[in-house]
Amino acid sequence: MQRIDFNCDMGESYGAWRMGDDAALLDHVTSANIACGFHAGDPATIHRTVRAAVARGVAIGAHPSLPDLQGFGRRAMAIGPAEAYDIVVYQIGALDAFARACGGRLSHVKAHGALYNTAAKDRALADAIAGAVRDVDRSLVLYGLSGSELVRAGEAAGLTVAAEVFGDRTYQDDGSLTPRGRPDAMIEEVEASIAQVKRVVLEGKVRSVSGKDVPVRADTLCIHGDQPGALAFAKRIRAALAQAGVEVKTLAAAR
């Protein structure tokens, strides 16, 4: 039986600003990537999201970002490996503390936004992220875009690495994600999302926006909690995977 982890970026509310329906999404995913306060999230939001994930048996991951609250972590910033290392260690520590306080444990780390996409191609940045994860806790799983430098850096650092694919993002010919500034960056129709998910999970391929089939490795599947209709996507994708005979489990359960 084929198996995949189903993750969601969440915990991205901040103060009086509310983003996504995290509580409902947690009923359908197996792993939660929780914002650490640099692009979104505040102590109360982190606490609430971690507590809800622990209650549902959902794996807890740190979702570290560039320090960019105003730009939601999606704007490129020129930072060096040393600074990247420090901000990732700092943010992992925040999530780890809340996980322990809520009676759970941190299971994985997934970079957010511009940090994630830059590290997919920049090996020095990828090495810094992988080194930060390793030095905090080498049992943590590092999530990275399938085929990326971040995956290779994690493997070189001796970490367990999860190659990530996306159910609500489109792809370029080189396997990278279509930049957010383009109108075709997101998949907005749930049937199109399900078709992409089935291909990446069952066939190990994704169709790029230009029509090219790109090989991918699918250990974990992501959707974004901030996308309109995220809950409907999660429900339908989970049902489609079950219908296709794919077991949906956390990576910790599979190890």
Image (cartoon, rainbow, N blue to C red):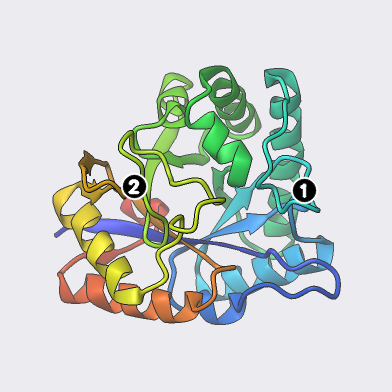
Residue 12, by quadrant, is bottom right
* 65 w.r.t. 192: above or below: above
In terms of depth relative to the viewer, which is nearer, 188 or 130?
A: 188
Q: Position of residue 240 (x, y in %)?
A: 24, 75
Q: Which residue is mark 2?
A: 255
Q: Quadrant of the N terminus?
A: bottom left
> At x 69% / y 47%, what residue is drawn?
73
Which amino acid is tagged 1?
Answer: Phe
The CA distance from mark 1 to mark 2 is 31 Å
Q: Which residue is mark 1?
A: 38
Which amino acid is tagged 2?
Answer: Arg
Q: Residues within 10 Å of mark 1 (few under 14, many from 20)?
A: many
Query: In this rendering, which labeled residue sits more in front, label 1 or label 2?
Result: 1
Mark 1 and mark 2 lie on one chain; the one further toward the N terminus is 1
Tell whether 49 sits left or right of 189. Answer: right
Q: Position of residue 91 (x, y in %)?
A: 73, 43
